[in-house]
Amino acid sequence: MQRVLKFLAAAMLLFLSGHAAAHFDSAVQALPAGYAGDDIKKWYGEIFASVPVAASIKEGVFAFAVDLDVGPNFSQEYDTASGKLELRYNMAFNQIAEGWSWDELANPDQRDYYRFKFLPLGFETASRHEPVVVELYPGKMVEVKNRWRYEYFLAFDNLYDFYERKVDDDAGFGAAVAMKAEDARRLVEGKTLRTLALCRLKPPYHAESNTFWKATFAEPVDYTLRKRYLVGDLLEVWFYDSASGKVLAKVRRNQP
């Protein structure tokens, strides 16, 4: 029996990952233990190279893990009075300031100037070549390293499908999950709670920005930051326990 259960779990993981992303089942109540969502780096590369974008990508539902370690957005606190674990991912400052996100005619009393919001999906760093000795200033030689950082985001413009437009710092995705204090302590101390963003992509499907900082004597590194966005509609936000795969809460849109 245990062998059968392991086989089913492995099959489910295969079904929910990689090229099976287009078939993600939002009705499931549990995920395989250790589930980490679709591979954002792989999928960004595939979508970036797709001309035209494949029908399976246009119609599919993707599930990307939100990087909770970026900034102070995520909080979890157990309320002993209610017996609930309070979960919240604040969105007040997650606005995309790229030119394609501007809404120059926006009335700030009615809608946001920065139309698109973001959820961070991870990053990677790399070096393109070995350090080189260069003359930064006449007669001043220094060994310069190069460093690239790639940051991945989900960009979406339907945040207010989930809650009424707010400008306070507490605006965001939240859930209160009933559980025993010891279970909440295990989640918090074990750092196994994860957040999953379900989305469907739409034109232009992807976007990039590039920022470069030239090496100086104080910091002899040529540094390039490349931000990579997948563009789509946010469908749901899930909170789940990565250790067991149990889905704790599904935050759904107020509007279909």
Image: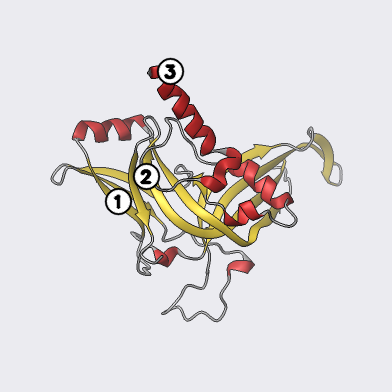
Residue at position x 65%, y 38% in the image: 125
Rendered image: mark on residue 3 = 3
Per the model, the C-alpha gap separating discs 2 and 3 is 28 Å
Residue at position x 25%, y 36% in the image: 184
Q: Are marks 3 and 1 in contact (CB under 8 Å)?
A: no
Q: Is residue 153 shown above or below 221?
A: below
Tell me the amino acid under the disc marked 1. Answer: Ala
- Closest to the camera, between mark 2 and mark 3, is 3
Q: Quadrant of residue 178?
A: top left
Q: Is residue 132 left or right of residue 159?
A: right
| Mark 1 secondary-structure assignment | strand
Q: Is residue 206 left or right of residue 155?
A: right
| Mark 2 secondary-structure assignment | strand
- Closest to the camera, between mark 3 and mark 1, is 3
Decide: few, some or many residues near mark 3? Use Cα within 10 Å; few <14, some 14-19, many ≥20. few
Tell me the amino acid under the disc marked 2. Answer: Phe
Q: Are marks 1 and 2 in contact (CB under 8 Å)?
A: yes
Q: Is residue 253 visible?
A: yes
Q: Seen from this angle, which residue lies furthest left?
A: 81
Q: Quadrant of the N terminus?
A: top left
Image x and y of residue 235, in percent: 45, 57
Residue at image mark 2: 239
Residue at position x 47%, y 24% in the image: 7
Rendered image: mark on residue 175 = 1
Image x and y of residue 23, in percent: 53, 46
Q: Is residue 149 shown above or below 96?
A: above
Tell me the amino acid under the disc marked 3. Answer: Arg
